[in-house]
């Protein structure tokens, strides 16, 4: 890591007298992962307090700890850096650290598909460059700084996913990352309970470009996004309309892959992506547009994107002996549920379409309405069995009933009860989609199904 302890103290306006500059190996928030000459940042979470693990971090080799309250520590050769807020301190350090590198940063945001776009961009750019990317879900107020700290002198490109759930958060992330290219993949109702309305979500997501003179790549088929960006001249649109510089002429499914004809202002190309659904065509368009504007040849783009790998719990299709399981349990919102249903329907199988869906959280006053509308959509979506879990998802059932369409439906209060019912009704050839907000832990259902039904193959 290209950083020393003296630089950190200057950034945080802390006075320390060092006999020598002390080089830092890395900055981390997990004491269990601390190695020699790391800096440990003590963060207080809902169920833990990093300050309780300062001494453990020192034992594991940390050279210093950044804290916001007094701690007793045993090894007096170590350094304690006390600040008002450890998260803000880490963000300050990350902003400084990013400024030390002359590399191109691509920032990715949107209500759905951020991780997929990030992974597609990474797959494409890795054909030509040394690329660092957001790992896992490190895309927020804590995660983005940790991602920035992974930059080294060897990297030429950084691809950072930038996710927000509250007003003002994107401004902080944009100030840290200062992206040269930004993707706003779509705008939906995710976290609308915190934002209040769609217009606020659009404004807050668009703040990704606030601190840099960057190119913006935006979904031209999203009217809320287009209306907000209409007065900007640095926007490149992608979508299905022929009026966009990156658009689609036709698309088709080939097994569990999707093929489409990409149309640009200068050429057409046949693109094949190893995933299903029209939403993933949008994700691919965003990634291709960024790469093309960067100057990457279409042959390298095609080679890169065909090697794209989806992340765990995100529309992973798992072939079991008895049935097909679609694990999309990482998170949920209205748009992502619809997209996942499209994947469920696209899988060729003679059995039932079974949808297991838990509450969509952080919808605030919109919760009843959005769950109800989702139920209406599900009723017309070739779902044979609907299994709902949690308090809010009862409104999904009500939405189904309002249509007059008959659909076998069961509601449960726990993942265990839902799992047991799935096992009762499963027949050969069935397809089971598991979906829900992260806080509902529907990945427990996925794991129990995998444990019970044994051998499987991920597609």
Image (cartoon, helix red, strand yellow):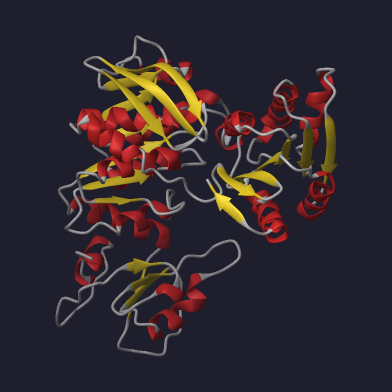
Quarter assignment of residue 91: bottom left
Position of residue 219 measured from the top left corner of the image (x, y, whole percent):
41, 23
Numbered marks: total: 0
Quarter of the picture holding the N terminus:
bottom left
Figure check: 319 above or below 63: above
Residue located 17% across and 58% down the image = 153
Q: Nearer the viewer, residue 94 or 218?
A: 218
- Is residue 300 visible in the rendered image? The answer is yes
**Above or below 36: residue 233:** above
Left/right placement of residue 456 relative to residue 86 reads: right
Residue 26 percent across, percent down from the top left: 30, 68
Name the one closer to the observer, 338 or 433.
433
Of residue 263 and residue 184, the one placed in the foreground of this image is: 263
Q: Position of residue 433 (x, y in %)?
A: 67, 40
Residue at image position (84%, 32%) is 408
Residue extending farthest top = 243
Residue 225 image position (x, y, % from top left): 43, 21
Residue in the image at 32% along x and 27% along y: 217
Any part of residue 214 in sight: no
Query: Which residue shows up at 17% across the image and 54% down it?
Result: 100
């Amino acid at each position: 890591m290209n950083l020393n302890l003296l630089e950190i103290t200057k950034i945080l306006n802390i006075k320390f007298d060092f006999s020598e500059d002390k080089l830092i190996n890395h900055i981390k928030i997990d004491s269990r992962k601390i190695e020699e000459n790391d800096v440990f940042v003590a963060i207080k979470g809902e169920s833990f307090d990093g300050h309780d693990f300062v001494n453990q971090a020192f034992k594991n080799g940390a050279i210093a700890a950044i804290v916001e309250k007094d701690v007793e520590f045993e090894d007096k050769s170590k350094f304690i850096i006390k600040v008002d807020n450890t998260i803000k301190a880490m963000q300050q350090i990350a902003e400084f650290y990013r400024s030390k590198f002359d590399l191109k940063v691509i920032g990715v945001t949107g209500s759905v598909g951020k991780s997929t776009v990030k992974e597609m961009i990474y797959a494409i750019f890795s054909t030509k460059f040394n690329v660092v990317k957001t790992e896992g879900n490190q895309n927020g107020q804590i995660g983005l700084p940790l991602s920035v700290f992974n930059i080294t002198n060897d990297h030429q490109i950084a691809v950072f996913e930038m996710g927000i759930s509250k007003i003002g958060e994107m401004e902080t992330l944009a100030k840290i990352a200062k992206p040269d290219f930004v993707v706003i993949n779509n705008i939906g109702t995710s976290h609308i309970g915190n934002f209040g309305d769609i217009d606020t979500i659009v404004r807050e997501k668009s703040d990704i470009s606030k601190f840099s003179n960057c190119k913006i790549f935006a979904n031209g088929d999203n009217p809320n996004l287009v209306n907000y960006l209409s007065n900007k001249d640095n926007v490149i649109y992608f979508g299905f309309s022929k009026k966009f510089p990156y658009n689609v002429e036709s698309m088709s499914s080939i097994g569990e892959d999707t093929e489409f004809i990409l149309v640009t202002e200068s050429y057409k190309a046949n693109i094949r992506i190893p995933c299903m659904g029209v939403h993933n065509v949008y994700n691919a368009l965003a990634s291709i547009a960024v790469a093309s504007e960067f100057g990457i040849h279409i042959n390298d783009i095609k080679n890169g994107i065909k090697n794209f790998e989806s992340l765990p719990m995100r529309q992973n299709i798992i072939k079991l002996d008895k049935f097909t399981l679609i694990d999309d349990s990482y998170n949920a919102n209205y748009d992502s549920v619809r997209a996942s249903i499209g994947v469920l329907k696209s899988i060729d199988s003679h059995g039932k379409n079974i949808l297991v869906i838990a509450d969509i959280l952080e919808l605030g006053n919109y919760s009843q309405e959005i769950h109800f509308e989702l139920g209406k959509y599900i009723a017309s979506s070739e779902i044979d069995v609907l299994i709902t879990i949690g308090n809010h998802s009862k409104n999904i059932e009500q939405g189904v009933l309002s249509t007059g369409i008959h659909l076998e439906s069961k509601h449960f209060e726990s993942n265990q009860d839902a799992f047991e019912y799935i096992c009762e009704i499963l027949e050969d050839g069935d397809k089971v989609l598991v979906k829900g907000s992260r806080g509902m832990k529907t990945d427990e259902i996925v794991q129990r199904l995998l444990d019970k039904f044994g051998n499987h193959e991920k597609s």
